[in-house]
Structure formats: structure tokens, C-alpha cells
Amino acid sequence: MSRPIAVYVHIPFCTVKCGYCDFNAYAGMDALKPAYLEALLAEIRANAPLLEGRTIASVGFGGGTPGELPAAHIATVLDALRNTAPFAPGAEVTLEVNPGTSSPAHLNALRAAGVTRLSIGAQSFDPAELAFLDRIHSPEATAATVAAARAAGFTSVSLDLMYGLPGQPLERWLATVRAALALQPDHLSLYALTIEPGTPLARRVERGEVTPADPDLTADMYEAASDLLETAGFEQYELSNWARPGHQSRHNRAYWTDADYLALGAGAHGYLAGERYANIDHPRAYIDAVACNAPRGPRPALAAVTTPPHPAHVADWLALRLRLLEGFSPREFEARWSLSLEAAAGPVLADAEAAGLLERSPRVRLTRRGRLLHGELAARLLAHLDRTLPRAAPAAR
Ligand code: SF4
């Protein structure tokens, strides 16, 4: 039986580089798009051996702004993937679009190309907040994009929203959440703004021009939004993600559940058989590397490969599983690692349980309070496993 695999395709182009963004994204490189498409196709051909015997369970186009690539390019990439490995019945093909750059004709063409799910970067419904974030769209453009997505036949539409913005009061954030709910999306992703080192926003903070949001207020925003979404019939299934029944992101679940995913495109990250790898970041260097190395075989634009030390790998697994509200069973852990959960992480989990951060029976899962402290718990698990596990693993996968 062929094993499922997810495929991530990175599209690094954006109209404007937002001041808070540290993604591998570039403005002003439109002229590279045709060569970039050719490089993606060559990379797919070179990676054919990695897809042998596999069924593509999902494809995620992320960026950057994949919606900035012509829909015909997306169709060509999907055709190349279909010609290399079969898609699973009902495979999810998800693509991120920005409201400022998505016309109804473009969305129609994406749907016709086989995209099944749209993730729309709404971020806020407050014009001043959108301007602060350097977003090029208006709240009205987001509403128009959702309407156009529905008209194009998308039955799974997600909105991304950001909270914890400098100077953002709780009520203004909740107004954004309510405005998003009024558009009746199927899925919502809520992300706290982080000030990433090296970004223009970080420099504004260093110069004292911008004061980061208070962490307690940011936590209150998360909790208040959770309440609103629950009341509106959304189920939280991951720390930052809520869905109506049947609308969880299957592609993103691959990242949280230790599934293999193939990386395509500049700066894309992949995970195959326990090994993490990343492609070269810069689009031009990526195109050159693929042109040079594709005839030699898989992963022609490789920048880095890491097999995490055993303790870090186990800690990653735990941290990712705990992001999902369903958590995991001790038996799943033991099957994956040939280790008793109690022996590996018992003391840290017991402390977290005593502090009200997680439940341990029948599944290990975060409590509502624990969701706010996931990062700290993950750090404690890593520190503990680093001390107690050998650096090299027995072959368990
Ligand atoms: S649109 Fe998204 S990927 Fe592009 S610069 Fe802005 S935040 Fe970054």
C-alpha cells in the first residue's frame, strides 16, 4: 500500500514586504516568476524518486503570497505533481491568498486548477491596523474576496487574523473577530504578532517608536477570542486554529503529527523519514541551484539537512502533538519511540498536571490554561529529555 505524503510548495513573491514579516518573501521580483515556475517543475522531476510509492494526501501553497503566482502556474505545478504521484481521494490543496491581490477571475481559475481550500490573509478588519501592518488591502477587500471565493465554488475558506498588535485594545480585537465571523468562514487561524529580530518593525521598537503589546493583554485577547469562536460553533483543534466540523486543515495536521512532507521552492522546509531539510532561500539562487543540480537527482536546491539529536526529536514530537487539542495517547508515544512515556517525560508531565496545565488520562492534552503556556512546557520537556535520553536513537521508525 502506498504511504501518504504531504507536499509544501513555497511561493516567495509579495507585492509589498510587510514591516513585521520575517518569512522568506520578496517584493519586486515579478520578473522571476516564469523562471521560478520552470525551477519548480524541474525540482518535481528531480524529486520523483522521493514520491515513488507515495500518495499525495495534501498540497499546501504558502509563501510569500502564492496567490500572486498566475493561476496557470499553479495549475501547471499541480499537473506535474499529479503526473508524478497519485493524489489521495479528496486530497486537500490549500493556497494562501491576500485580499488585495485576488480578483474573482483569479479565484475562479484557482478553483478550476484544483485548489480546494483558500486561506485568506485578512489579519485585521481595522483600517489603521492594516496600515500599521503594511497590508495593502482594506476590510472591504477581505469581504469581497470571501464572497468571490464562495462564488468560485470554494467550500472551505479560512481567514488569518492577528492580535497583540501595539496599542490594540481588547475591544478592537474582538471587533475584528466579530467582523470575521460575520463573513461565515469555515476556519480561522489566530496569530499573536511577534516582533521578529531584523525586521523594520523590530527596528521601530528599538528606536522607541513602537511599544510592543502587553503579554497579559495578549493572553486576554486569545482567551476572549476563544470564547467568541466557541459560542459561534467553532471547535479549537490546535493552539492557533479553529474550524467548523469537517474543516480542519488536513495539510497543516501533517506538520503536527510527524507525517512526511516534501518541500518544493525557495526556502521550503521538508521532513522525510525523521530528517529535516531546507531549500536555499533566495529565489534567484534557488533557480540557479535547481538548474545546476536537478539532473543529479532529488533535492537539487538543498541548503541544510538535519537529523535532530534524539532528545530534541522526541521533544519536538511531544511539543507538536501538544499543539493539537486532542493531544496523544501514551501508547502512540510508545509506538513511535519504543520508550515508555512515564520513563521519558513522567516528572515534567506530572508537574504540569499538578500546575493545571495538562490532563494525562485518557490522553495527554493541554488544559485551557496550558494552551497559554505551551512554549514554556515545551522548553521544560526539551531540557529534561536532553538530560535523560541518549543523543542517538535506536532505529524506531
Ligand atoms: S504578505 Fe505575508 S509573506 Fe508577504 S510580506 Fe506580508 S506577511 Fe510576509
Image: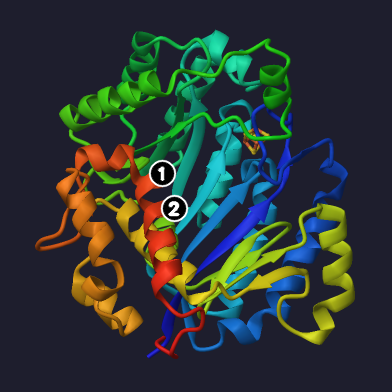
Q: CA distance from mark 1 to mark 2?
A: 6 Å
Residue type pointed to by label 2: Thr
Q: Is 100 situated left or right of 218 in this image? A: right
State if disc 2 and disc 1 touch (CB < 8 Å): yes
Q: Is 320 situated left or right of 17 in this image? A: left
**Can the viewer see residue 362 in this picture?**
yes
In this view of the protein, which residue sits in the foreground, 170 or 93?
170
> Which residue is drawn at the image coordinates 17% and 43% (left, top)?
356
Residue type pointed to by label 1: Phe
Q: Which mark is residue 116?
A: 2
Q: Position of residue 307 (x, y in %)?
A: 58, 76
Q: Quadrant of the N terminus?
A: bottom left
Question: In the figure, 156 relative to 200: above or below?
Answer: below
Q: Which residue is mark 1?
A: 154
Q: Count of labels shown? A: 2
Q: Which mark is residue 288?
A: none
Q: Position of residue 8 (x, y in %)?
A: 57, 61
Element under label 2?
loop
Q: Is 133 situated left or right of 41 in this image? A: left
In this view of the protein, which residue sits in the foreground, 184 or 322?
322
Q: Position of residue 367 (x, y in %)?
A: 19, 44
Question: In the figure, 192 relative to 277: above or below?
Answer: above
> Which residue is drawn at the image coordinates 19% and 44% (left, top)?
355
> Which residue is drawn at the image coordinates 71% and 57% (left, top)?
267
Question: In the figure, 289 relative to 239: above or below?
Answer: below
Pointer 2: residues within 10 angstroms few (<14), some, or many (20+)? many
